Image: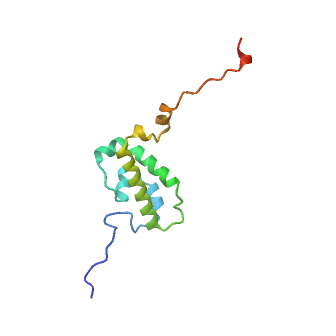
Amino acid sequence: MDDHQSCSIAPIIPLAGESNVLAKLKGYSSAEDFFHGLGVAYDPAKLSVMRLHVLKRMGEYISGDDLDDLPDRVVVARCRSYLERAYEDFLQSGPLDQRVFKVLKDAVAPPGQTFVALDELE
């Protein structure tokens, strides 16, 4: 008789074992919801200044993957990995270095040159 209980990741990762994981993730309204649901540890002080950046980067990672027809346990594992990776990106270098938002990308873009045709000169 085996007196060991089976191990489960459900207590560590609340979404583990759930069904329709993508719909649940789409219903989350805060960065903390994602970190809690996917069981990813974070520093609240650091997350408070980079929450939108991390979620945007996670979204970029997810958009490069087709999760629609995968089993929910695989979706949880991949989304967890993407969130960890995105969070780590911003721990290693800040939002100004990563520049995930257009306004930050445009701030360092070279200025456009104005073209004036020769026949328009007087």
Is residue 65 visible in this depiction of the protein? Answer: yes
User: Where 88 falls versus 112 (above or below)?
Assistant: below
Q: Nearer the viewer, residue 16 or 89?
A: 89
Question: Which quadrant would the N terminus be assigned to in this image?
Answer: bottom left
Q: Position of residue 53 (x, y in %)?
A: 42, 44
Q: Position of residue 118 (x, y in %)?
A: 72, 18
Q: Nearer the viewer, residue 66 or 72?
A: 66
The extreme right residue here reads 119
Q: Position of residue 85 (x, y in %)?
A: 40, 53
Number of on-image labels: 0
- Find residue 38 and report its image quarter: bottom left
Q: Is residue 109 left or right of residue 41?
A: right
User: Where 1 falls versus 41 (above or below)?
Assistant: below
**At 40% across and 58% down in the image, what residue appears?**
80
- Find residue 2 and report its image quarter: bottom left
Question: Which quadrant would the C terminus be assigned to in this image?
Answer: top right
The extreme top residue here reads 122
Q: Position of residue 59 (x, y in %)?
A: 47, 51
Is residue 30 visible in this depiction of the protein? Answer: no
**At 47% across and 60% down in the image, what residue appears?**
22
**At 41% across and 67% down in the image, what residue appears?**
18
**At 41% across and 58% down in the image, what residue appears?**
81
User: Where 14 falls versus 103 (above or below)?
Assistant: below
The extreme bottom residue here reads 1
**Image color mode:** rainbow
